[in-house]
Image (cartoon, rainbow, N blue to C red):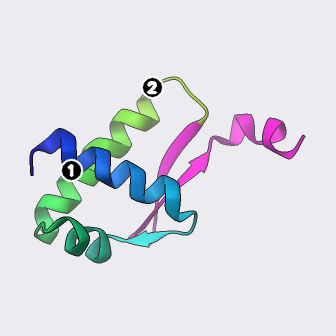
Amino acid sequence: MDVKKAQGAMEAILFAGGDPVGLGRIAAVLGLDLPTAEKLMNDLADRINGAPGGLCIKNLDGRWQMCTRPEDAEYVRA
């Protein structure tokens, strides 16, 4: 699986899941080893978190979650 496809799948897993997802589970679903999955996830998080938009990716004690950026939370609650 190429990098763009793997990161697209990671993004979809986080978006659809709602709850934090362990990297081991993501790696297993995508057929990746843990070091590769970790690098791809860190790169994806850096890209999403560094771009303008209402979403961010957080690492919560080794589990990953797509979240609303804190500065946009008030609009979600409206």
Using residue 30 as the reference point, say whether residue 71 is left or right of it.
Answer: right
Task: Please give the name of the residue rendered at 12% of the width and 59% of the height, measured from the top-left corner.
Answer: 36
Q: Position of residue 3 (x, y in %)?
A: 14, 43
Residue at numbered disc 1: 6
Q: Pick whichever, 9 or 45, lies toward us.
A: 9
Q: What residue type is labelled 2?
A: Ala
Q: What residue type is labelled 1?
A: Ala
Task: Please give the name of the residue rendered at 22% of the width and 60% of the height, measured from the top-left corner.
Answer: 38
Q: Residue furthest right?
A: 78
Q: Is mark 1 on a helix, strand or loop?
A: helix
Q: Where is residue 24 in the image (x, y as percent from the top left)?
A: 27, 76
Residue at numbered disc 2: 51
Binning the other alpha carbons within 10 Å of mark 2 as few (below 14), some (14 to 19) or many (20 upward) gives few
Above-or-below relation of 22 to 42: below
Which segment did they paint magenta? 55-78
Quadrant in which residue 55 is drawn: top right
Name the N-terminal-most of marks 1 and 2: 1
Q: Where is residue 17 in the image (x, y as percent from the top left)?
A: 51, 64
Binning the other alpha carbons within 10 Å of mark 1 as few (below 14), some (14 to 19) or many (20 upward) gives many
